[in-house]
């Protein structure tokens, strides 16, 4: 059974989807991804989990009361906090990727009791990088934002794919290429205008993460070792004194390789029950 719903949170209204049965598993999408971007992955997990996907505020069906007040990573984490509180009183499994992983880490630093296990797939935790690496990452991030301003949305999307090591043609045989038509444009515009700069500016509370009751499992892509999000994840694992885990494919594996990602995620969560 699939349930579509809306939750009012401070300053916004969130659209979310629940499907399947079993322990609650929240998928927090990366980039401009909304509730539907993880459909293929959610469908493969729904036999074992109650899977929650949602539109971040500003994307698709989730609206903002005051559009002149753009969200920060902390805003998104608070939204997820309120959404979780609305659907469960128990700690949940959470799997976030890219900005979704950063949002999930911020949630854990502020509300660790809501998340039993977090799989953080290639979060852009640039504060962990060396000064030289951090400078390069900030340059890359600003280059994407500048490309968006000067060359347009899809030029910036291509730049993002290059800098994060994404091969847009590398996907499982039954996965269709992500649409690049006008229907996707508003979400991309919002992400590049507001969320991408918010990621660049955000700093996590690293001591809070290290002391959190949540079991945090940093995860990297098999084919993204040459990118700084991959490097950030290895440093996060080192900071938390836990081994990193490897997922198939690259930075966008949640959408490009849903079968392989679902298999690996299930393998990872099975021996890690929520206390």
Image: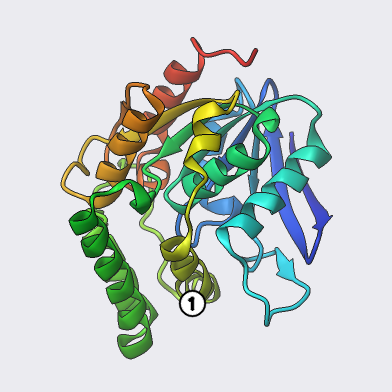
Where is residue 195 drawn, in percent x and y?
A: 51, 66
Q: Quadrant of the C terminus?
A: top right
161 vs 18, left or right, is left
Relative depth, front residue between 102 and 208: 208
80 relative to 55, above or below: above
Apparent side of residue 29 relative to residue 155 in the rendered image (left or right): right
| Quarter placement of the N terminus | top right
Question: Could you say where residue 7 lies in the image, as x and y percent from the top left?
Answer: 81, 53
Q: Kindly indicate the quadrant of the structure image that contains residue 153.
A: bottom left
Q: Is residue 32 above or below residue 225?
A: below
Q: Is residue 250 visible?
A: no
State the residue lying farthest toward the bottom. Answer: 150
Say which quarter of the image contains residue 200: bottom left
Q: Residue at x 52, y 73 (%)?
A: 194
> Where's residue 205, x and y in %?
52, 45
Q: Which residue is mark 1?
A: 193
Q: Quick one: label 1, few (<14), some, or many (20+) residues within 10 Å?
A: some
């Amino acid at each position: 059974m699939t349930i579509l719903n809306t939750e009012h949170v401070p300053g916004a209204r969130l659209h979310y989807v629940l499907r399947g049965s079993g322990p609650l598993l929240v998928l927090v999408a990366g980039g401009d991804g909304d509730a539907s971007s993880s459909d293929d992955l959610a469908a493969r997990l729904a036999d074992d989990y109650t899977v929650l996907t949602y539109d971040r505020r500003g994307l698709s069906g989730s609206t903002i009361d005051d559009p002149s007040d753009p969200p920060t990573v902390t805003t998104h984490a608070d939204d997820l906090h309120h959404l979780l509180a609305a659907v469960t009183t128990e700690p949940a499994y959470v799997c976030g990727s890219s900005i979704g992983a950063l949002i999930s880490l911020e949630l854990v630093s502020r509300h660790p009791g809501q998340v039993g296990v977090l799989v953080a797939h290639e979060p852009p935790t640039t504060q962990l990088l060396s000064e030289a690496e951090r400078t390069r990452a900030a340059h890359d991030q600003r280059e994407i934002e500048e490309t968006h301003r000067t060359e347009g949305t899809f030029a910036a999307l291509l730049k993002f794919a290059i800098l994060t090591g994404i091969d847009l043609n590398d996907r499982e045989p039954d996965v269709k290429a992500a649409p690049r038509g006008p229907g996707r444009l508003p979400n991309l515009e919002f992400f590049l205008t507001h969320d991408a700069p918010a990621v660049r500016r955000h700093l996590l509370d690293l001591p809070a993460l290290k002391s959190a009751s949540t079991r945090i499992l940093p995860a990297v892509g098999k084919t993204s070792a040459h990118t700084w999000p991959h490097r950030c994840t290895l440093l996060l694992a080192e900071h938390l004194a836990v081994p990193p885990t490897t997922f198939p494919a690259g930075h966008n594996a949640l959408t490009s390789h849903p079968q392989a990602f679902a298999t690996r995620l299930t393998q990872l969560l099975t021996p890690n029950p929520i206390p």
